[in-house]
Amino acid sequence: MNDKLIVALDYATEQDAMALVNQLGDAVSYYKVGLELFLNTRGSVVDLIKAQNKNVFLDLKFHDIPNTVAQAVAWAASLGVDMFTLHSSGGEEMMRKSVETVNETCERLNVKRPNMVGVTILTSFDEAGIAKVGYKNNIADTVLNLAGLCKTSGMNGIVCSPHEAANIKAACGSDFITVCPGIRPAWAAAGDQKRITTPADAIRIGVDHMVVGRPITKAEHPYEAALKIMEEIGGVTK
Ligand code: C5P
């Protein structure tokens, strides 16, 4: 099944999240679980989604000293999720140690190894914001540099804007996974996302996974909205 579309379950409760998963049925195979839903359900929502034979993208954005993150990601891997995030600004040692621990854990438990993707500069930052934090380069250069760190640390890819995806693929290789939010079909409201791309254009750019929330979760008919996006994606040849 097409796993390019990841629907963001931006809900607080298991009931709301699973109601959407059930409603979308066969139209969607991949779901993002973030901090709010994971914490409020004490993680149990992951098992519920996996029990429906769906993929889970666990977006907890780990960032701490190498030893602490490496221990935490072993537990993330043991949940059987398909992909999860680390903050690439945690550095090469943090990412490399985490990759090693995940490899060992998955082998020991005989579970599928999840893809590990690095968060670079959050889209909530603008140039002035990252300068204040102390970054010396602009956002585009900083993102490329962090993508390179992810690559050399053995990570599988990064979270980025679709606008950055082509450059990152050129620098890190076509098999380096790009996971992109900021996707808006022509018929959906932009909301607070500023630099947006349609699903069809994201596929043309070469994005591997697009994370879509409100165009589906807030649609009057979420199933029809998801189907329309799948049709749009399916109709594109790169
Ligand atoms: O509703 P919308 O389609 O904007 O949701 C996009 C999803 O991607 C949300 O879960 C949001 O938190 C997430 N995200 C983002 N920008 C990032 C990282 C994650 O919009 N840089």
Image: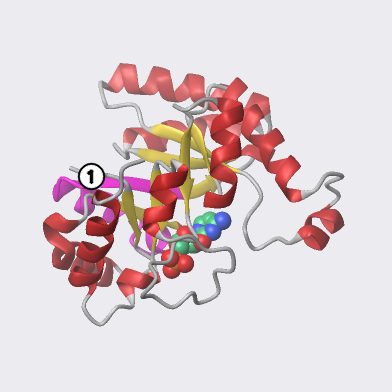
Residue 33 seen in the figure:
no
Query: The residue tagged with tag 1: helix, strand or loop?
Result: loop
Looking at the rendering, the stretch of residues picked out in magenta corresponds to 37-59
Foreground pick, 155 / 101: 155
Horizontal and vertical percent for residue 41? 33, 61
Horizontal and vertical percent for residue 164? 59, 46
Say above or below: 226 vs 208.
Answer: below
Horizontal side of 142 relative to 58 (left or right) equals right
| Residue shown at the point (57%, 30%) measured from the top left | 170
The amino acid type, in three-letter code, at marker 1 is Asn
| Residue shown at the point (33%, 53%) measured from the top left | 6
The residue that disc 1 covers is 2
Q: Quadrant of residue 20?
A: bottom left
| Residue shown at the point (34%, 26%) measured from the top left | 113
Horizontal side of 181 relative to 132 (left or right) equals left
Say above or below: 126 vs 106.
Answer: below
